[in-house]
Amino acid sequence: MKQDEDALSEELRLLRKDVHQITEHRLFTSQSTIGKILATSFGRGLAFGLGSVIGASFLVSVVVFALSQIDFVPVLGEWAARIAEQIQTGQE
């Protein structure tokens, strides 16, 4: 019985130590106010939005370029050529 209490006491001590380390972590101490949390969330949102737009633009350009290279299938080749032509006229 004493051995179980000692083991439980030791586990509780280790748990308290871990909780203390977590609460002292930079993530918790740097975002201690609502303003800091809002500013951080806003910055993360801006970065995510910008990354999404850049990634989508790159992906669409790669897909359109790949489709414009398809000439052996008449329907797809013609469709891809029209898309490429629209993009070229939109850039001018």
Image: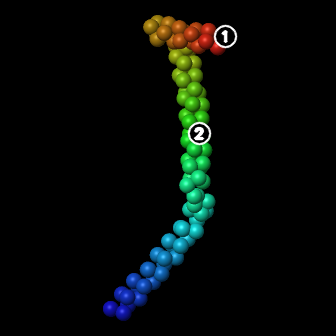
The relative height of residue 49 versus residue 91 in the rendered view (above or below) is: below
Visible residue check, residue 27: no
Q: Amino acid at mark 1?
A: Glu
Q: Nearer the viewer, mark 1 or mark 2?
A: 2
The answer to whether residue 2 is left or right of residue 18 is: left
The relative height of residue 42 versus residue 32 in the rendered view (above or below) is: above
Out of 32 and 90, give the one closest to the viewer: 32
Out of 48 and 35, give the one closest to the viewer: 35
Task: Tell me the residue at 60%/48% (across/down).
Answer: 39
CA gap, disc 1 and disc 2: 29 Å
- Residue 46, label in figure: 2
Task: Tell me the residue at 50%/7% (across/down).
Answer: 78
Q: What residue is pinned by disc 1?
A: 92
Task: Tell me the residue at 44%/80% (across/down).
Answer: 12
Q: Amino acid at mark 2?
A: Leu
Residue 64 in the image, given as x and y percentages of width and height:
54, 18
Residue 7 in the image, given as x and y percentages of width and height:
41, 85
The relative height of residue 83 versus residue 48 in the rendered view (above or below) is: above
**Quarter that holds the C terminus:** top right
